């Protein structure tokens, strides 16, 4: 081993964690391909092409965030924060703009304030998260979660990411209300795999399943590349295009040769933020309630994700605790500060990192690889966008199947444990929110443990957090009552 390789191994503890440089690089690549869609999706959620578009996301002043600028800052912040997290926390948990918070910004917050003011609320949210982490409060809450709930969180995240993969690929689709049925979702189109993209997803899922079952090194990466090649061939022959114009087309990226490979990123949104503007425009009370919502969602979404990823990677102790979790929580909280400052929305640990862990990633070196690829994506957007989500989402199903195995650590014979664990697992995919699942699990845990005569064994912090989640789930009526 050369001096450079030994230094790298010692810093990231690669050998100590039973990994190799090759496994870390492959894991970083797979994680990037599994979550690269965020550079396409975040601009679609936050950005607009023109204020005159029927679907333009206008702030209170009628302004928009240009799509190309949002794409550039999305890749920039994801790249920087993933690298910092890998170097400082040394975990293979990549960071990017969190889904859910960006939708909240576009649909609820921006129409009340300006975009810079909305991003200012995100910065404040991040500062609070960092302070809570620095004081040890966030770590204390993390350690207070019972092992059974930690196992349920991990299993729930497995179900959640699998559901994401099924939906993103078109294998599971929402049934329009006009269809005259009470069934909310269904298989493919009218109960059939009626589109080439969905069929290619199935091919990719079976291929990756076989490769993983046979323990082929790089199985997920090989599967993504092979499925992308097949997708490109099908697109060249069938000319399907995007699902925006063809219901049987590709969900996000179309696998076709780009007209150009390089492009200069427009980073004009960096620094376009107003920290206190929202408090002046809509009042201290209304702005504070928005910040409370952001903080609670960010606080537990990231904590739950790290719990699940850490357990899947085998990096936690017998109580499900991650060593050095304090540093990780501080850096993750900084993702909201940096994301808001760049108008990319709050950045947090991405659950899709599980795909890289499934490929063998165990250290922050994988994160560095993912981060470098995100930085390159600022200039190579046409190139990476060749990979359709239908080729990457099978990896989420595979990893979800692995993570659901955490239920083996839950004693379902005791109903005071079974119901909170089951609710945690089911609410995450059904509400598309890790934080919602954790909240329901916490509330039901303290109630049922108390009913079973074990209330004194419940950690005081769990009571506090459960009450906070009650407020979180009722923030709408509370806001209406106060205003």
Image (spheres, rainbow, N blue to C red):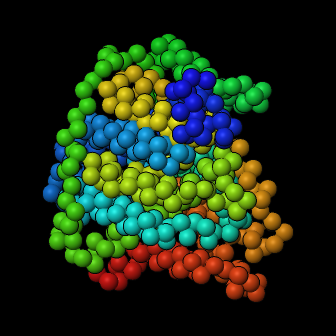
**Image x and y of residue 149, in percent:** 67, 65
Residue nearer the viewer, 13 or 354: 13
**Image x and y of residue 463, in percent:** 58, 81
At x 37% / y 28%, what residue is drawn?
Answer: 376
Q: Is residue 45 left or right of residue 281?
A: right
Q: Is residue 372 left or right of residue 362?
A: left
Name the image quarter holding the N terminus. Answer: top right
Residue 317 vertical placement versus 92 (above, below)? below
- Dividing the picture into quadrants, the one containing residue 446 is bottom right
At x 65% / y 75%, what residue is drawn?
Answer: 444
- Dividing the picture into quadrants, the one containing residue 483 is bottom left
* Residue, far right: 413
Q: Is residue 165 visible?
A: no
Residue 370 vertical placement versus 448 (above, below)? above
- Dividing the picture into quadrants, the one containing residue 210 is top right
Residue 150 vertical placement versus 183 (above, below)? below
**Image x and y of residue 431, in percent:** 54, 59
Residue nearer the viewer, 272 or 89: 89
At x 16% / y 53%, what residue is drawn?
Answer: 62
């Amino acid at each position: 081993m050369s001096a450079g390789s030994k230094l790298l191994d010692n810093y990231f503890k690669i050998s100590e964690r039973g990994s190799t440089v090759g496994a870390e690089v492959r894991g970083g690549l797979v994680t990037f391909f599994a979550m690269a869609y965020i550079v396409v999706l975040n601009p679609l959620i936050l950005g607009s092409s023109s204020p005159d578009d029927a679907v333009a996301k206008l702030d209170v002043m009628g302004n928009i965030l240009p799509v190309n600028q949002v794409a550039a800052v999305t890749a920039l912040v994801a790249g920087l924060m993933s690298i910092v997290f890998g170097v400082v926390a040394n975990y293979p948990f990549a960071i990017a703009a969190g889904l859910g918070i960006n939708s909240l910004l576009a649909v609820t917050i921006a129409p009340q304030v300006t975009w810079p003011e909305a991003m200012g609320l995100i910065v404040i949210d991040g500062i609070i998260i960092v302070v809570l982490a620095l004081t040890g409060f966030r770590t204390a809450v993390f350690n207070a979660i019972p092992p059974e709930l930690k196992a349920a969180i991990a299993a729930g995240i497995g179900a959640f990411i699998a559901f994401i993969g099924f939906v993103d690929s078109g294998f599971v689709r929402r049934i329009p209300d006009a269809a005259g049925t009470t069934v909310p979702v269904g298989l493919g189109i009218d109960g059939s795999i009626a589109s080439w993209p969905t069929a290619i997803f199935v091919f990719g899922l079976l291929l990756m399943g076989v490769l993983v079952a046979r323990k082929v090194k790089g199985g997920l990466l090989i599967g993504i590349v092979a499925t992308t090649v097949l997708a490109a061939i099908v697109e060249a022959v069938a000319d399907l295009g995007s699902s925006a114009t063809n219901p049987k087309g590709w969900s996000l990226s179309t696998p076709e040769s780009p007209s150009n490979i390089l492009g200069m990123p427009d980073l004009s949104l960096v620094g376009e933020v107003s920290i206190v503007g929202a408090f002046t425009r809509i009042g201290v009370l209304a702005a504070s309630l928005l910040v409370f919502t952001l903080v609670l969602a960010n606080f537990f979404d990231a904590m739950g994700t790290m719990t699940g990823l850490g357990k899947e990677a085998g990096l936690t102790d017998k109580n499900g605790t991650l060593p050095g979790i304090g540093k990780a929580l501080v850096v993750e909280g900084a993702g909201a500060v940096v994301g808001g400052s760049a108008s990319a929305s709050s950045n947090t640990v991405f659950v899709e990192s599980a795909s890289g862990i499934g490929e063998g990633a165990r250290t922050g070196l994988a994160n560095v690889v993912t981060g470098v690829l995100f930085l390159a994506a600022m200039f190579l957007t046409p190139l990476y966008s060749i990979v359709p989500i239908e080729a990457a989402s099978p990896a989420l199903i595979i990893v979800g199947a692995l993570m659901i195995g955490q239920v083996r650590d839950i004693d379902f014979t005791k109903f005071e444990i079974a119901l909170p664990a089951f609710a945690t697992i089911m609410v995450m995919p059904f509400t598309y929110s890790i934080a919602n699942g954790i909240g329901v699990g916490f509330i039901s845990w303290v109630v049922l443990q108390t009913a079973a005569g074990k209330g004194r064994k419940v950690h005081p912090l769990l009571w506090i957090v459960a009450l906070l989640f009650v407020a979180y789930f009722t923030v709408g009526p509370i806001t209406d009552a106060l205003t």
